[in-house]
Amino acid sequence: MKRPAQQTLLLDLVFAALSDATRRGLLTRLLDGESTVGDLAEPLKMSLPAVSKHLRVMENAGLLKRRIEGRTHFIQANPKPLREAVNWIEHHRQFWEGSFDRLAALVEKPPSEKSPHQTKS
């Protein structure tokens, strides 16, 4: 199990990596399977070094795995950090939905059912 500081750093890296549309697009393409850096760069209007920088950001966040054969770099998605980010979002979503549900129930109560300190004077 990761320590809270490690978990926070991992989430920061994952969310920072996902904050860029190009990186999200690359990750989406990699969810279909392994690809080379050149194949990933081909449809983009950017240089190979620029694509490599994006891939390094995602690698540092743990979102990618790299396999090297000779001069060819094969990249594949690693879903584990995404799952951890989704779990964090889900935990906070449940908290906020519960808070909103309680607020909605309070607002929807007829004034006669509210306690005296809940009504306006």
Image (spheres, helix red, strand yellow):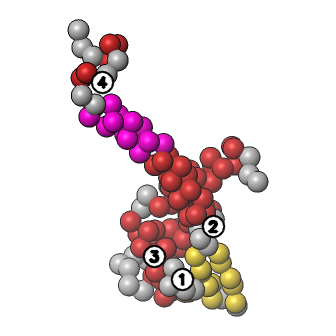
Residue type, mark 3 in image: Thr
Quadrant that contains the N terminus: bottom right
- The answer to whether mark 1 and mark 3 are in CB contact below 8 A is no
Mark 1 or mark 4, earlier in chain: 1
Q: State the SS at label 2.
A: helix
- Asked whether, in this view, residue 1 is left or right of residue 92, the answer is right
- Numbered badge on residue 28: 3
Distance in Å between CA atoms under marks 2 and 1: 21 Å
- Mark 1 vs mark 3, foreground winner is 3
Front-most of 1 and 104?
A: 104
Q: Is residue 64 visible?
A: no
**Residue tagged 2:** 80
Distance in Å between CA atoms under marks 1 and 4: 64 Å
**Residue tagged 1:** 37
Mark 3 or mark 2, earlier in chain: 3
x, y (%) of residue 18? 47, 61
Mark 1 or mark 3, earlier in chain: 3
- The answer to whether mark 4 and mark 2 are in CB contact below 8 A is no
Above/below status of 59 relative to 84: below
Q: State the SS at label 3.
A: helix
**Residue tagged 4:** 113
- The answer to whether mark 4 and mark 3 are in CB contact below 8 A is no
- Mark 3 vs mark 2, foreground winner is 2
Q: Is residue 82 visible?
A: yes
